[in-house]
């Protein structure tokens, strides 16, 4: 079985500041790792994914994430946030079996 | 290119009633998964359909059932509704073997049970 823990339920940050959203996972098998974003009253949109290879992955909207196998973490970062980045962010893991397990989400609020 | 479409967008039902939610996958996708997202929580996997068969199931009671049609569209049925079934129900699509690349999600159906 897999589990995902998002360490911060809410992250407030000022516009143009850097941000890190933290995600730890556990799994007895190899997993694929994802970050999704959910804007109000919308579904989830894929930000980025880690499948294999380089541990630093780049996604849309200037986001990137680093996979750390020894710490079983997959933290999401952005060097300079915008008001439009205000949303709910979900970390997820998936196996070859196809089922995805999601964390409970982190609410990112960007203040002017 | 149409993404995943879900209907209806909002629904209000009474305890004990039955409900059917509908999903059309993204063009070219043939695998459909359903998730329940309660307020303040992440999506929880209900089940996945491929080739009109339930391929995987999460930890949900038999009151939750589904169907996939030959055109790959899918329905989620919930019987004997409980207040706790109030949630956003998300449909996601992909292709077999492509799950590693992530899913395309619809905007969801907001179900309120009163």
Image (tube, grey):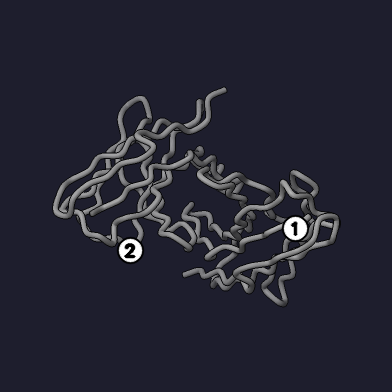
Q: Residue furthest front?
A: A112
Q: Which type of secondary structure does the marked residue at label 2 adopt? A: loop
Q: Which type of secondary structure does the marked residue at label 1 adopt? A: strand
User: Compared to B5, does A80 lie above or below?
Assistant: below
Dot 2 and dot 1 residues touching (CB under 8 Å): no
Which numbered disc, 2 or 1, marks the residue closer to the eye? 1
Q: Which mark is residue B59?
A: 2
Relative horizontal placement of residue A79, taking residue A109 as reference (left or right) = right
Q: Residue at x 17, y 54 (%)?
A: B15
The residue lying toward the viewer, choosing from B95 and B12, is: B12
Relative horizontal placement of residue B100, taking residue A2 as reference (left or right) = right
How many numbered markers are drawn?
2
Mark 2 crowd level (few <14, some 14–19, many ≥20, 10 Å Cα)? few
Q: Residue furthest top?
A: B1
Per the model, the C-alpha gap separating discs 2 and 1 is 39 Å
User: Compared to A45, does A54 lie above or below?
Assistant: below
Q: Residue at x 25, y 40 (%)?
A: B20
Q: Are marks 2 and 1 on the same chain?
A: no
Task: Please identify the quarter of the rendering in which residue B39 is found.
Answer: bottom left
Q: Residue at x 41, y 56 (%)?
A: B45
- Give me the chain letter of mark 1: A
Q: Report which residue position mark 1 lands on.
A: A111
- Give me the chain letter of mark 2: B
Horizontal and vertical percent position of residue A5: 57, 72
Dividing the image into 4 quarters, which one contains the C terminus of chain A?
bottom right
The residue lying toward the viewer, choosing from A91 and B51, is: A91
Relative horizontal placement of residue A10, taking residue A84 as reference (left or right) = left
Mark 1 crowd level (few <14, some 14–19, many ≥20, 10 Å Cα)? some
Task: Please identify the quarter of the rendering in which residue B1 is found.
Answer: top right
Relative horizontal placement of residue B82, taking residue A84 as reference (left or right) = left
């Amino acid at each position: 079985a897999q589990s995902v823990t998002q360490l911060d339920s809410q992250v407030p940050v000022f516009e143009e500041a850097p941000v890190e959203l933290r995600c730890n996972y556990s799994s007895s098998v190899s997993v694929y790792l994802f970050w999704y974003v959910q804007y109000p009253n919308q579904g989830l949109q894929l930000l980025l994914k880690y499948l294999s290879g380089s541990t630093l992955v780049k996604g849309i909207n200037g986001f990137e994430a680093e996979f750390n196998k020894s710490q079983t973490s997959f933290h999401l970062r952005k060097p300079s946030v915008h008001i439009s980045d205000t949303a709910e962010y979900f970390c997820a893991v998936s196996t070859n079996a196809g089922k995805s397990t999601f964390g409970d989400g982190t609410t990112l609020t960007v203040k002017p | 290119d149409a993404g995943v479409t879900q209907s209806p967008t909002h629904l209000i039902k009474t305890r004990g009633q039955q409900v059917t939610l509908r999903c059309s996958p993204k063009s070219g996708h043939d695998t459909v998964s359903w998730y329940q997202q309660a307020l303040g929580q992440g999506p929880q996997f209900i089940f996945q359909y491929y080739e009109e068969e339930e391929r995987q199931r999460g930890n949900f009671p038999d009151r939750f059932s589904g169907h996939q049609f030959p055109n790959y569209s899918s329905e989620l049925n919930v019987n004997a509704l409980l207040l706790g079934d109030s949630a956003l129900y998300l449909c996601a699509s992909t292709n077999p073997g492509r799950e590693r690349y992530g899913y395309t999600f619809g905007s969801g159906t907001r179900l309120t049970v009163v």
